[in-house]
Image: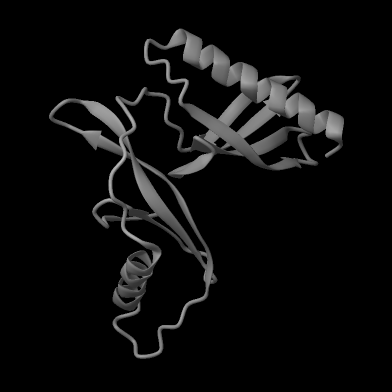
């Protein structure tokens, strides 16, 4: 896409999300997003972008969506997106990267039936957030999470406070 087309897609998505937030009683200014990719369907001419939801410039585990744009308006969306507000962001002692990598290793071993040769390349390890829902209070919380991407294309999200594994 040209720079002008990308700008039109970004503007349409920003306006769409702004409208949704203004129409909702659950406004959440702490959640933002980053555009990670653009494209165009040559058959239909529809433009699209892939967006990843973020907090404080950190990714949310498994909150990514594709927005389809035609004539300057969002005409479709596919993926996971958090439109609800969160009740807070709290700090806590986090598990370190070594413990997280052991958790991922154990998960890979389980997935492969404890095969003896279960080597896996780690492409990236970064801190982000996971959305946690407390059913007793019907509230959402953002929990720090380690996001691990592997060479086989899997992405693991691990709660950085208690080690709970979320897999994308």
- The image quadrant of residue 83 is top left
| Viewer-closest of 23 and 45 | 23
Q: Is residue 144 visible?
A: yes
Quick one: quadrant of the N terminus? Answer: top right
Q: Would residue 168 be visible to someone looking at this image?
A: no
Q: Pinpoint residue 76: horizontal percent, then vertical percent.
A: 59, 28
Number of on-image labels: 0
Q: In this view, does 4 lie above or below 93?
A: above
Q: Which of 74 and 23 is in front in this view?
A: 23
Q: In which quarter of the image is residue 49?
A: top right
Q: Residue drawn at (29%, 24%), measured in percent from left and top? A: 87
Examine the rendered structure and indicate whether residue 157 appears above or below residue 68.
below
Is residue 4 shown left or right of residue 147?
right
Identify the image quadrant of residue 104: bottom left
Colour scheme employed for the rendering of this structure: one colour
Residue 65 % position (x, y): 54, 38
Percent position of residue 66, x then y: 59, 38
Looking at the image, residue 119 lies above or below residue 79: below
**Horizontally, is 79 left or right of 50 in the view?**
left
* Residue 8 image position (x, y, % from top left): 77, 24
Q: Residue furthest left?
A: 136
User: Is the C terminus in the top left, top right, bottom left or bottom right quadrant?
Assistant: bottom left
Q: Is residue 141 left or right of residue 20?
A: left
Residue at image coords 55%, 20%: 17
């Amino acid at each position: 896409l040209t720079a002008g087309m990308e700008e039109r897609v970004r503007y349409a998505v920003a306006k769409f999300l702004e409208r949704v937030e203004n129409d909702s009683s659950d406004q959440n200014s702490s959640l933002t997003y980053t555009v990670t990719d653009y494209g165009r369907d040559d058959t239909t001419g529809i433009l699209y972008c892939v967006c990843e939801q973020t907090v404080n410039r950190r990714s949310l585990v498994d909150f990514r969506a594709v927005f389809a744009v035609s004539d300057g308006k969002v005409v479709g969306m596919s993926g996971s997106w958090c439109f609800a507000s969160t009740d807070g962001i709290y700090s806590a002692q986090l598990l370190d990267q070594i413990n997280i990598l052991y958790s991922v290793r154990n998960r890979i071993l389980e997935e492969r039936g404890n095969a003896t040769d279960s080597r896996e390349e780690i492409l990236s390890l970064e801190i982000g957030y996971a959305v946690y829902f407390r059913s007793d209070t019907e509230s959402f919380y953002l929990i720090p999470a380690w996001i691990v991407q592997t060479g086989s294309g899997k992405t693991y999200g691990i709660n950085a406070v208690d080690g709970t594994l979320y897999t994308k």
